[in-house]
Amino acid sequence: MEPGGGTVSDVQFDVSRYFLRFENSTVKVIVVKDHPKIEVGKRSIGPFVEGREMSLRLWEAAELVQSGIVKYKEETKFDISELYKQTWSESNKPQLQQIDPNFYQKLRMYYSDPNVEDSEKRKVEDMVTDLVSQRLSKILKIALRGGSRSEMTKNMTEEEKWLYDRLNSLLRSWERELRTFKREAD
């Protein structure tokens, strides 16, 4: 078993395990429309009173946002101005920059938000492509260097740590195989 819970051949990324954790995290919402209490399994949510701030599990909030009952409070939304800053910072600094640990999950929520214009999503997609390319390049360089996982991965999201672990494992395995070639030749 390799660091991160897989084997070198285990390279299929399962985003659902990270997203499930994120979907069950608590987020703040603001009620935009009065609505009676809702039963969700054994749990009751509400009643919903316009203007009231509430804490909900993200998956609950997402359904209520889609229904027009609540909206996300600003700090829980994908922040485009922060994306601009992050993209600039990542492009202009040699080391991997700190990023919101929920960056990829918030991005996924942003893309699925029906209130966001398609033209805005396309602009964000271009920036995200640039940002992710910069980050991937740096993560590969970090994996090539090796070293202490905790120090190397401190500015990575959980998804990026997964990738780092797989890359690092694959690179170390490849290096071992090359040393084997040399020993066999001797």
Image: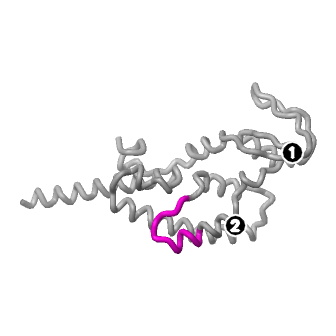
The residue that appears at 86% across and 49% down in the rendered structure is 68
Q: Which residue is mark 2?
A: 81
Measuring from the top left, give residue 145's x and y in whole percent: 33, 61
Residue at image location 50% in from the left, 55% down from the top: 156
- The mark found on residue 172 in the picture is none
Tell me which residue sits at (65%, 57%) in the image.
107
Residue that protrudes farthest toward the bottom in the picture: 92
Classify residue 49 as left or right of residue 150: right
Circles 1 and 2 in contact, beta carbons < 8 Å: no
Q: Secondary structure at mark 2?
A: helix
Of 75 and 110, the residue lying toward us:
75
> Does 94 lie within the magenta span?
yes
Q: In the rendered view, would you say 96 is above or below 48?
A: below
Query: Where the C terminus falls, by quadrant?
Result: bottom left
Q: Is residue 141 something one can see in this rendering?
A: yes
Separation of residues labelled 1 and 2 (CA atoms): 25 Å
User: Which is more toward the observer, 4 or 185?
Assistant: 4
Q: Residue 127: x percent and y percent?
A: 62, 70
Q: Amino acid at mark 2?
A: Ser
Locate residue 25, reporting x and y percent.
66, 41
Q: Helix or strand or loop: what does disc 1 sit on? A: strand
Q: Specify few, some or many for label 1: CA neighbours under 10 Å numbering under 14, 14-19, or 20 or more.
A: many
Residue 10 left/right relative to 37: left
Q: Which residues are magenta?
A: 87-98
Amino acid marked by disc 1? Val
Q: Residue at x 92, y 44 (%)?
A: 50
Residue where numbered disc 1 is placed: 31
Colouring method of the image: one colour
